[in-house]
Image (cartoon, rainbow, N blue to C red):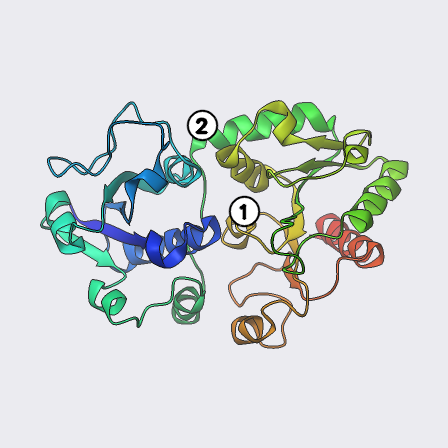
Amino acid sequence: MKRVAGIWDVTRTGGSIGILLVLLEELEIQRLVHHADVVEVILVGDATYLIDVSLSERADAPEGLGLPNSARLSPVMSVLQAMSGVTDRHVCSDRLAVADAINLISTNCIPWPDPEMLVQGKYTYDSTRVIQSYFVQTGSIPRLSVTTELLGWARGYLQEKSGGRLPVAVHLKNNPNVPGQSNADLESWLAFFSNCARKNDAHFFLVGDDATNETFRNLPNVTIAKGDGIHLDGYLALIQAAGLFMGMMSGPANIALFGKTPYVIFKNPDHHAKEMAMELGDADRYPFALDNQRVLRVWDTTENLTSAFQRATRQMVFS
């Protein structure tokens, strides 16, 4: 059996969920390129970061790289477990060489990225250049998906809560520790939701653990998924299952970026301006995006939100 082994270096990525989803998309591409049977992920770094720190049992024991069944999974591991394309997950600490980890998994194993590129600092995790290159060559990309079971749950949840209205998943990135870094303008979104409530043709599902104010909870057309005990893997499933995704450029948004769900993603124009120009040029979409998937480098004002939503819903009617 041929395997693709993805190497996710926590020490380089900082544990970013968004970067992890970029890597998972690259691994799906490598699986197709090499006609591999399965995709596995090796997490390199401190294993205590990857599981509940209160556990006395380490997950990087030399006698076996597999996680112990008793481990309470971190958000990182819950995402890996939720994705349909990942068949197994392994952890090695800094004291174990990546090459040794690969040998423990299988002798018929294709590592990605190349360990030498990582050592030499020639590989950049936080970029879609590999994905864009594959799209230029083939005209398509594999689309990320959560497991069938998780997706079925998400569709049922959305159907029950939306009452026949368009279910729209929304991620309002709001990290007070990094002001100005594409955080959502909560007042603009609140006004947008309130205006939409008058028409009553859409129901908005707030995903993520970001802080919102109590006013959102009082809107008749808004459900806060966190309030129903939903966590990160469920948030990703809701984004995939929704009829539309709206929100800020963020980690969870990447499940939409590499999926089939129609989306409008907002990016503050002064945040990562140089990097976004390298990724998109002057376009409002990635080259591999579908016709109903857009990234807008504009401020998330109520007017811009309304205009983008109206365009997206009109496109659904005429598609």
Report the amino acid beneath label 2: Glu
| Residue located 60% across and 65% down the image | 285
Q: With respect to residue 69, does 268 lie above or below?
A: below
Measure how far apart labels 2 and 1 are at the Cα level: 19 Å
Q: Secondary structure at mark 1?
A: loop
- Looking at the image, tell me whether mark 2 or mark 1 is earlier in sequence order: 2
Mark 2 in CB contact with mark 1 (< 8 angstroms): no
**Badge 1 density bin: few <14, some 14–19, many ≥20, Cα 10 Å:** many
In the rendering, which numbered label is found on residue 149?
A: 2
Q: Residues within 10 Å of mark 2 (few under 14, many from 20)?
A: few
Q: Nearer the viewer, residue 145 or 274?
A: 274
Q: Is residue 318 left or right of residue 267?
A: right
| Above/below status of 277 relative to 196 | below
- Identify which residue, 122 or 134, lies in the foreground: 122
Q: Amino acid at mark 1?
A: Pro
Q: Quadrant of residue 133?
A: bottom left
Helix, strand or loop at label 2? It is helix
The residue at the point 52 percent across, 40 percent down is 236
Position of residue 145 measured from the top left corner of the image (x, y, whole percent): 45, 42
Q: Can you tell which quarter of the image residue 235 is in?
A: top right
Snapshot quadrant of residue 116: bottom left
Residue shown at the point (22%, 51%) measured from the top left: 94
x, y percent for residue 272: 58, 69
Residue name at image x 24 percent, y 41 percent: 90
Residue 97 % position (x, y): 15, 54
Q: Position of residue 23 (x, y in %)?
A: 38, 55
* Circle number at residue 226: none
What is the number of the mark on residue 252? 1
Left or right: residue 299 versus residue 238 is: right
Nearer the observer, disc 2 or disc 1? 1
- Location of the N terminus by quadrant is top left
